[in-house]
Every structure is written in C-alpha cells, then in structure tokens.
Amino acid sequence: MKRTTLTLVLVGVILLFVIAYTYSSEKNVLATAATQTKGPETIVLEKITNKYEPVSFSHEMHTGVAENCAQCHHTPPGENIACSECHGAPFDPTELNKPGLKGAYHRQCIGCHKDAESGPTGCTDCHAKKSEKK
Amino acid sequence: MGKKEEGKDRRIKITRRGFLKATAATGGISLFSKANSVVGVEKFTGAPDRYGVLTDLSLCVGCRSCEAACNEINNLPQPKVPFDDQSVFEEGRRPEPNSWTPVNRFSNPQDKNKPIFVKRQCMHCDEPACAAACLVGAFKKTPEGAVIYNEDVCIGCRYCIAACPFYVPAYDYASPLYPKVRKCILCYEKKVKKGEPPACVEACPMEVMTFAKRKDLIKLAHKKILEKPDKYVDHIYGEHEAGGTSWMYISPVPFEKLGFITDVSTTPYPEFARGFLSAVPMVLILWPALLIGFYMWSSSREEIFKEERRDDHD
Amino acid sequence: MTNKTIEAYPLRSWMREKLFLGMPFDEYLKSLITPFNIFVACILLVGIPMYFLRYLQGLIFVMHPSNEYPWGLFICLGLLGIVPLSATGFIMASAVYLFGLKEYKPLVRLAVLTGFLGYACAVAFIFTDIGRSWRLPYPMILSFGPQSILFLVAWHVALYLSTQFVEFCPAIFEWLGSDRFRRWALYTTIGATIFGVILSTLHQSALGALFLLMPGKVHPLWYSPYIPVFFFVSSIWAGLSMIILVSWICTKVFRDKADDGFLNGLDNLTVGMGRAASITLFAYFAIKIIGVAHGYHWNLLTTSYGYWFQLEMFGFVLLPCFLFAQGARYRNVRLLRITSIIAVVGVVLNRLNLSLITFNWNLPHREFPKWTEYIIVLTIFTVFVLLFRWMVNRMPVLREHPQYKGMH
C-alpha cells in the first residue's frame, strides 16, 4: 500500500511537469537567453558612421541655387573657406556651441533643405548604405 | 516588608533578562541605522566634474541613428521593425527591455511641417530614486555622472521601476531565468568611464546632443537660450527636475506638449524617504525603553493587586 | 490492526497520535473527503500547475509585463494586504505580557498563530513576485542597500517571522511533548514580545513609507508624509478586528478543539477588543483628516477619486468605528463580529487604493491585474487556511494542553 502510494505520487509529479512544459510554448525563453552573453569589451562604434558611402556633393549646383555665398560659408564674413577648416572633432569643451564636422554638415544641409522644402532630407537620399551592414 | 522586597527582586530578575535581550536586539538592529551615510540619501554635492548630455530638441530630424547605435553597443536583439523605418512614430513608445532609447514624434504647434522628435532615455539623476529604492544597492551614481546597474545582485523586486518618476526602467518579464532591469547606462564601461561620449551622442548626424561636463552644459544651454530667445523656451529640463539630472533638454516648444512629465519634484526623490529613515533609530531606542517601562508598571500593579488580595484574605 | 499491535510500533503510533488525529491512516484519509476539502482540492489543482508555469515561462505568464504598474496583486494585496491583518501577534502578546491584561491570555496563541502564518504567506507572495525568487536571501546575506526602506522591510519581516515562530514554539513543544524545550521557549516570551513590537512598529510603517518615494504616482488624498503613521495605526485596528473575526470562525469551525477557558471568556474579550478597535479607528480617522489638511487637498474631495476616498473613510473607517462602539456599549457580540468583517475589508481596501487603484492616477490608461494573479493569490491563501487548520487541529492553540494546564 505504501509503495503504490509513493509510485502514484511520483508519477503524478512527473505528469504535472510534462503537462506544464507542453503548455509553455513561449519560444521567447530561448530568444532572451541570447541577450545575456556579455559582448566583447571593444566595439568599434565608427561602424555607424562607416555605414554609409561617401557623399557626392555638387557645389556648382548649389552656387546656382543659393542667394549668396554667406548662406553656407557663414564665418568668417567675406571669406569662403571649407567647413573642415573650423569644424573638427565634436564636443570641444572650450567651444561647446560649435558642432563638430559631421554635425555642421548635417545641420547646414538638412536645415536648409527643410526650410526651403526642397532637397534631400533622408539618410540614404544623400549617401547610400554600405552593402556590408552589421 | 520582607515579602515585598522578595517580590521586587523577582520582578527585577525577569525584567533584567528581558532588558538584556531587548538591549542586545536594539544594539543589533541599530547597526542598520547607518541609513543616512549611503549614496542616494545625502545631498549630491560630490563630483562637480560629472558629465552630462544636453539635447537640443530643435535639431532632431528623427533619423533614429541613436537608437541603432544603442542597440549595437549593448548587443540588444534586432527589432522587428528596422531602424530606418519611420512608421514607428505612429505610436508613442517608452523604454523597453530591448529598446532603451525610443524616439517619439510630436506635432509642432509653431510649424505643422516640422514635427519635434524627442529622444527618451534614463535621465541619470544626480540623486536617483532608483538608487534610493534598491534594497540590494544595485544602482550607483558614478562620479562620471552615469547611473549604472549591477545585475549580479538584483533580485527583481521592481521597486526601482515603481519609484522612477520618469517611468524609465523596464523589466525582462519574459525571461524565466535571467530577468534584469534594463535601462540606458550611458555606455558607462565602454565610453563614459574613459571620457568618451555615449554611442547615441556620437552617432547623431545632427549633433542634437552635446557631451561635456554638466556645469559647462548648463552654461551652454543658457547661452543658447539667451542668443535666440525666440527659438527656445526659457527652461532647461533636467537642470532642477528631480534635484538635477545629468541628461538635460532645451526645446522650441513647451515641454508639456512633448510628453515630458512637468510635475516632477525639484526636491531630490531620496529626500522623501529621509524623514522616515531618520525616525528608525529613534524607535529602536525609545520603544524598548517604553515597553520595558510598561512591563515593569504592569508587573508592579499585579504585585500590588496580589498583595491587596492576600491582605484581604488575612 | 488492533491497538495493542500499533503501540508495538513507536514511530507509527507517534505518527497516528500527532499527525493523523489519533485515527488509523486509512480512516484518516477517508475523513479527509469532505465538501470543503474537495473545493480546496479544485483550487489547488488549478493553482499549483499555474505556479509551476510562473517559473517555466517567467513572470510574463502570471502578470501583464507592465512597467507603469510593476507591482500587481502579489505585492499590493498579498504583501500589503496581509501584513496589517497579521498584526494580531504583537497586539495580543503586548496586551497580555507588557500591559498586563491577563484576561486575554486564551487568545494569545491564536493571535500569534494567525500572525505567523500571515507573515509566512506574505513571504510566499514576495518569493513568487520577485523576478529571481532564488535570490530572496540576497538583501540579508550578499548585498546591502540600507538606504532603501524595502531593505528595512525585508530584514524586519524575516526577523519578525522568526520571532513569531519563537513565540509560538511553546505550543509546538507542548504538542510534541518536550518539556525541556517548552520551558526554554517560555523564557524567551517577554524578550520576543518586546522585540516583536519594535519590529512590527517599524515594518508596518515602513510598508507605507515605501510609497513616500512616489509622490507623483500615489493620489494626493492618500499620499502624505504621514503615510507610515497611517499604516501603523491602521495595523492596530486591523489586527484587533482580525482576532475578533478569526476567534469567531474558530468557535464555529473548531469548537471541539477549544476548551471552556477559551469559549466562555470570548464574549467579554470580544467586547474589550471592540472597544479598543473603536478608539483606534476614531484616532485613525482624525489623523487622516490631518493628512488631507496638511496637503491642502480639500478641493480634491469632490473629484471622482475624492468620492472614492470619502467612501473608504466614511464607509470603512467611521462606520466600523461607530458600530464597534455600539457593539461594545451594549455588549452586542454579534454586531462586533460583523463589524470586524467591515474593518478587515476596510484595511485591505486602503492598501489596495494606495498601491494599485489610485496608483498612477494621472496616467491616461489604467491597467488591471491579469486573471492569473487572482488564482495564485487564492491558491496561497488556501494553503494558509489549510496550514491554519492543520495546526489548530493538533496543537494546543484554542485550549490548554492537559499536561501543562495553568503552567504558563
């Protein structure tokens, strides 16, 4: 009588587990397991900026469209120098109000295109995505 | 006379035992009254050179490069909708376990054609409510400014999620074995600890966000607002909210219209718990004294009552 | 098997006497088939597999994966609701041993048992709710966060559970028949009582203080710097009401396990407790008004949440206060017992209002707990009732053990 009760209890517990597992259909269990691996220490973040091909910018076309040179070459007044002469690495603590080169390009281009309501404003409108994306 | 003294002795014996026990217990418990000496409750005057991030909401175009960068550096799983898809702006999103910095779109009352995009993530408060809440001390405000999380001690009580006034942390409810609290950690180990800007800040093509020392950013924000008072609302969100946060915003549109929580207290949140925590040692000392007093008083009453009964019988 | 044979087997005879209520095993099993037990078995048959699924699939199975409402019924009802009702232990023990009200002696063990099992249930709820249940001991042994009020709650609940167990030990040792351990257990009574009152004061109020960190999320009519005081004072009248209620149920269900000392004096004791509860309820009502005044929230009383607040205050605080006073004055024990139900519901309603119903009151959407939460709450509560019944049936809780009559 004792042995049969014990076996019955054991079988019952196993049955409970089997039933419960059959009903746990969430594959998410395994999916989220993948996110726990601690990634490599160094991740090359430049990949983001290296995600796009270089831009082919038509200066001639823009000289025809712009009202005057100062619209783009905003400093110093009268001189027309390249953006990269003044804009370098971003977040210079002595000149926080001056964006870096990437920010300067995008603010100038996208800003004007949005104001004029003509011209490319999306990412891939100006630079195509590189084929080997992560 | 002799009997009364005997009774008194008996009484003192019992109370001494109880007294010793209570004192030992009090001494043991009062070890926990170091409540005020841990980060999260004291006024945050430390780390004056801590970093911050200033977000200029007039510049964001909603390209979601920041979301992609965050996803990559933190090894988060690829979302169902790719990052260059703008359809996600149809619905307002909040930080989720695998999406720590959603960008939301709001209509601009000043210009229908130029919607405002708001990047939302952990504010990295100077005195975080999450750090004050955590019972295992899993959250720490680092000297560099980031509020980081230690998953090795977290038990999953979710008090931090309940306490956060900005509704930021998200929990892995779907993970049975390794659930964690998930939120932006300002790329602390990989970037900010070395003085480099977080991934989202670096990735942004418009440089919407500026990474620098918090005190310099406040000066920058005031300068921007002063130079163009028509362009910006005269308020830096995060300068005083929740007692000051490392992540701050300036905006062309009033913050209430952009989904910001504007009734956030300017008192740091850990201050709200301070009153109670400072009362704890009081109770630990006064209660044993009071209760032993009651015990002695009621015992003596009983003795007197018994004495009177005995006298009545005589 | 005749009685003569069973005594030749000491273990079996011990089991029969202590565990199977003196019946042979097969007879005992037959006696278990009652309508109530079948009802209980149905609940457990649904609840226990669901409990397994919570661990196989994660919390997402038992609750909505909400980060606006991270705490559901397990915390708001299971922890916050049960703890004030488990204040029975420290109230009765301090009344008898510290304030010298010896006439309440027959109720002490019942009160301590209710309190002990209640806190054990609360721990079961916490265990179920936290994401990594196996890490429950972490705040005790691995990593301390003493700036956290929850840390205080965790430590105090653990210590208090142990204290309640120690206070109940005399009954256990009387049941097991161990005289030496029983004497040792009795020596600890005064110290354990004092310790228990200190711990109770702190953690009853600390559970309220948890919400001090969320001034924007708890409705202003419920939020106040005085929340810890509200929680502590309400735990007193909640505990008193709970003892009235539980002792009433015991006279109905466990009448054969109670002795005259318990049954005859119960009416007088109920009147006394009703009086105390009435005074405490009135004081609580008054300090709640101070709370509203302190925050200048009078204008909120006419909002829809304000009407809900008024319902809680007038219907579940002032009404039982008045009814308890009436019942005590005219010695209407039946009225006192019915009122205790209202008071018990009232304290649970207060906890739910603060932590769940009015939580996030200014968010546009409300979320309701998932249906699975109700089932698991019911399951754990059922286990509580079963454990209570098991212990009252066997141990000298409602009666004095014949061997130790008058010895404590």
Image: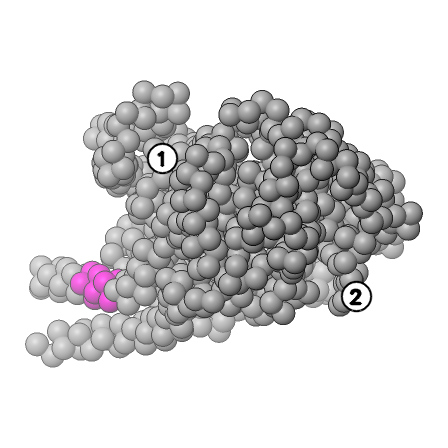
Tell me if C299 is positioned left or right of A6 in this view: left
Label ID, residue C220: 1
Residue at (44%, 60%) from the top-left corner?
Answer: B215
Label ID, residue A40: 2
The answer to whether residue A83 is visible is yes
Q: Amino acid at mark 2?
A: Pro
Q: In terms of depth relative to the viewer, which is nearer, C295 or C130? A: C295
Describe the element under mark 2 as helix, strand or loop.
loop
The answer to whether residue B105 is visible is no
Assess whether residue B290 is covered by the magenta stretch.
yes
Q: In terms of depth relative to the viewer, which is nearer, C42 or C87? A: C87
Residue at (56%, 52%) from the top-left corner?
Answer: A76
Q: Residue C311 at what x, y percent from top left?
A: 36, 23
Assess whether residue B62 is covered by the magenta stretch.
no
User: Label 1, label 2: how many angstroms apart (C-alpha)?
Assistant: 48 Å
Q: Residue C367 at what x, y percent from top left?
A: 58, 30
Q: Quick one: label 2, few (<14), some, or many (20+) residues within 10 Å?
A: few
Tell me if B25 is positioned left or right of A72 in this view: left
Q: Amino acid at mark 1?
A: Pro
Magenta-highlighted residues: B288-299
